[in-house]
Amino acid sequence: MVAEMTPVTQVQDTRQPIKATLQDVDAMLPYQSVRFHPETDLPSLTTLLGAGGAGVHTQLSNMSTYLGTDDGDILVSLGAMSFPHLVASVAMAAVFGAGRLPDASPETTCYAFAEYGYPTSIEFRSSGFLCLPDDPDAAHPDATVVPDRAALIDAMRDSITSHVEPVLGVFRSRKARVGLATLRRTARECCMSALTDVAAGLGRIDQLDADIAEVFQRGGSDNPLLLRTLPMLREYPTGSGVRKAGVEITTCCLRFRIPGRGTCPACPNQPAEEREARMAEAALLYG
């Protein structure tokens, strides 16, 4: 008598590994929000860029109202600082913290903005992610495996740039004298600042120089985040005791042109010793 065979039931893996990764990233970003939300009503980057960048212009108009200025130089310079920092923070925290890069396609990555025009939240509709071969979820249907760390870093740079570059193009269409080359350097320096924040959150300050070189100096002209001359990096004592480093940026947001606003602590338009003292004070108060 032949024994009856019981068919093997294939169990579908319905987990969404990137959801937990983004929860960890969200916990690292105290002033911004990030999550996996397939049904989000927030506009995607593609939507924001549609109709000549109408959604982006709306946020610049909100910024104009909040600041009380229609100076195009100030608006695009502030925009080139605020927008890249958020998307770079999310991508870098995921890659350096978990070895994964969320699928940040412009049509599936969605943004929320504060009333003053700065981006404060990213929500991902896609559950896809890139990972390394040794990732515990490398066999998951949502995973796309890349061969090595260098490939993952390259993909991270391209992902950040796919968000930043078209937005800078919209900024440049405003009536402003600030050129695209300056806006790009501003954005890259703000991405470097984002990496320092991520390094502090992950306890990677000792690896920060190597991380900066890997992201901003390798690959030559093929690197969309290439900074041929790096801004100075300084570590200051913080009020929280957490080790953090500050980037002495070389470009300016021009906010000091607004009556009563003055310069920010890292502004390059002040004596070097004054900037160092103000950045040290800010680290004690807010670090």
Image (cartoon, helix red, strand yellow):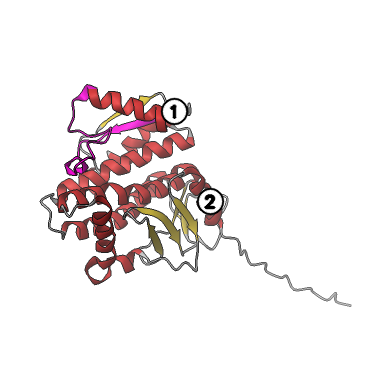
The dot on residue 23 is: 2
**Left of 50 or right of it: where is 177?**
left
Task: Label 2: state its secondary structure.
Answer: helix
Specify the amino acid type for callout 1. Arg
**Left of 89 or right of it: where is 263?**
left
Q: Quadrant of the C terminus?
A: top left
- Verify whether residue 261 appears in magenta: yes
Q: Nearer the viewer, residue 260 or 284?
A: 260
Tell me the residue at 73%/70% (across/down): 8
Q: Is residue 253 above or below residue 15?
A: above
Residue 122 in picture, x, y percent from top left: 42, 57
The crowding category of the residue bearing disc 2, from other C-alpha atoms within 10 Å (few below 14, some 14 to 19, many at least 20), is: some
The crowding category of the residue bearing disc 1, from other C-alpha atoms within 10 Å (few below 14, some 14 to 19, many at least 20), is: many
Residue at the disc numbered 1: 243
Q: Is residue 56 above or below residue 244?
A: below
Q: Earlier in the sequence, mark 2 or mark 1?
A: 2
